[in-house]
Image (cartoon, rainbow, N blue to C red):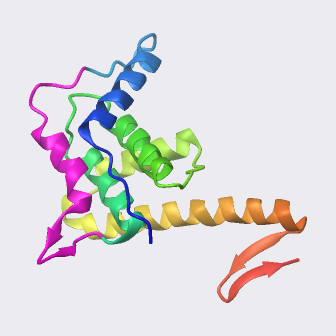
Amino acid sequence: MSKIIPVDLIDFELLLGYTQQKHSNKNEPIPKLSNNTERLESCLNTPFQKFSGKHLYRGLLNKAAILFYLVNKNHPLINGNKRMACICLDYFCFINGYSLDIPEDRFYEIAKAVVESDNSKKEEVIIIIKKITLEDAICVLQRFMSLIFKSNIKMEENGLNFS
């Protein structure tokens, strides 16, 4: 198992700068990062927390889900948290060798649903985020396998079905 690479504050600042530039001519400004970055750093570091020497969030999928949830819910920015949560999750998966293929409008709706979710439902929301991310991975795998084997492949309960 390879080591999972975190998104650090420098990465986030670069992503934020890119996003600010992309949205500068739209009516959707994303403000600069404030000098107080404690809340943001907590969001970025939590996926890698340990207790008694054991990771609280094991594996890429669990780390990705809590990262996405926290950047959304903890509101580390004045504006643009949903967009930055999507970009941050996409980047986190990318630097760890996984490519998300979620349409931008669906990605935003997922982020919006997370923000609007009841705080007491955190665990349930994280399970849904993992399910959506896993479903995306299966869709990407199915398209890839279909190209290789030139056949339709569907994920079924007992594994892949080649037709």
As drawn, 124 above or below 83: below
Identify the residue at horizontal 84%, vertical 78% (top origin): 162
Nearer the observer, 93 or 121 = 93
Nearer the observer, 149 or 119 = 149
Q: Is residue 149 left or right of residue 145?
A: right
Q: Is residue 81 left or right of residue 88?
A: left
Identify the residue at horizontal 21%, vertical 25% (top origin): 33
Nearer the observer, 43 or 28 = 43
* Magenta residue span: 32-57
Q: Position of residue 96 (x, y in %)?
A: 46, 54
Does the magenta segment cover residue 82? no
Identify the residue at horizontal 70%, vertical 76% (top origin): 155
Q: Position of residue 138 (x, y in %)?
A: 63, 66
Can you name the residue that lies furthest to the bottom here? 158
Quadrant for residue 125, please give it.
Answer: bottom left
Determine if residue 109 is in view: no
Q: Position of residue 9 (x, y in %)?
A: 24, 38
Identify the residue at horizontal 59%, vertical 62% (top origin): 137
Determine if residue 27 is in view: yes
As drawn, 17 above or below 91: above
Quadrant for residue 28, please give it.
Answer: top left
Quarter of the N terminus within the rendering: bottom left
Q: Is residue 161 left or right of residue 73?
A: right
